[in-house]
Amino acid sequence: MKRAPQRALAITHPRPYNQRMSLHLLFSGGLIIWVILAASAVAIAVVVERLLHYHRAQINSSEFLNGVRNVMKRDNVIEAISICDATPGPVARLVKVALLNRERGRDGMREALEEAAMQEVPRLEEKLSLVATVAQLAPLLGLLGTVLGFIKVFVQLQEARLHPNFGLLAGGIWEALICTAAGLAVAIPCYAGYNYLVSRMNSIVRDMERAATEIVNILANRPAA
């Protein structure tokens, strides 16, 4: 007795669920979701740029000051200034200002350092407010998208009256929920990133203050030539 030939089962490979869901979420969020995504892209770019800037600006201030101190023991001001020029960051620039104003005495050096610090700190604070703004606006944009989504739902309910199209209603609810989630998903890491950047900036400012105090003491306590 012959067996009936078995039919080959057609195996389909649907698109990955996560990929389909991601595209569905993007296209279901309405215009507000794209505004939130644009804001998040700006915040990411600023955070990366600030991280690189702080990485270049922060140096080992103790080691740097020890090198300057050793050079100044030989009264070699030109070499000390060359070390400052070769070292990146605001700490080295402040030390250079103190070296250039060493003849003005302790008070004169402090005054020059304060003026230099007033120029350096705004450079460190630059663009941080943009990250904070995105962190604050993202939940509000999500709330706006939520309100618009529910407005769409109630408009469709009013038009449908006794026979609502639940597929259309679901689209409005999707838009409302997605915008809320997207706003929070952007705001939380932006807020965390902003706090981290502020802590890095404060660390550099503390190094500047410590270096300014030390270089003033080094130069003011030098024996007179």
Image: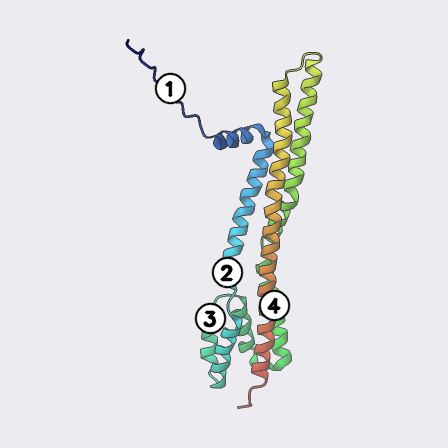
Label 3 belongs to which residue? 85
Image mark count: 4
Label 4 belongs to which residue? 206
Observer-side mark, 4 or 1, equals 1
Please tell me which of labels 2 and 4 falls first in the chain.
2
Please tell me which of labels 3 and 4 falls first in the chain.
3
Observer-side mark, 1 or 2, equals 1
Image position, residue 96 (x, y; %): 52, 73
The residue that appears at 59% across and 42% down in the rendered structure is 186
The one nearer the camera, 20 or 160, is 20
Please tell me which of labels 1 and 2 falls first in the chain.
1
The residue that appears at 69% across and 20% down in the rendered structure is 155
Amino acid type assigned to the residue bearing label 4 in the image? Arg
Distance, label 4 to label 1, CA atoms, is: 68 Å
Q: Residue furthest front?
A: 1
Distance, label 3 to label 4, CA atoms, is: 21 Å
Q: Secondary structure at mark 4?
A: helix
Please tell me which of labels 3 and 1 falls first in the chain.
1
Amino acid type assigned to the residue bearing label 1 in the image? Ala
Q: Quadrant of residue 29?
A: top right
Amino acid type assigned to the residue bearing label 2 in the image? His
Label 1 belongs to which residue? 10
Please tell me which of labels 3 and 2 falls first in the chain.
2
Q: Can you tell which mark lies on residue 55? A: 2
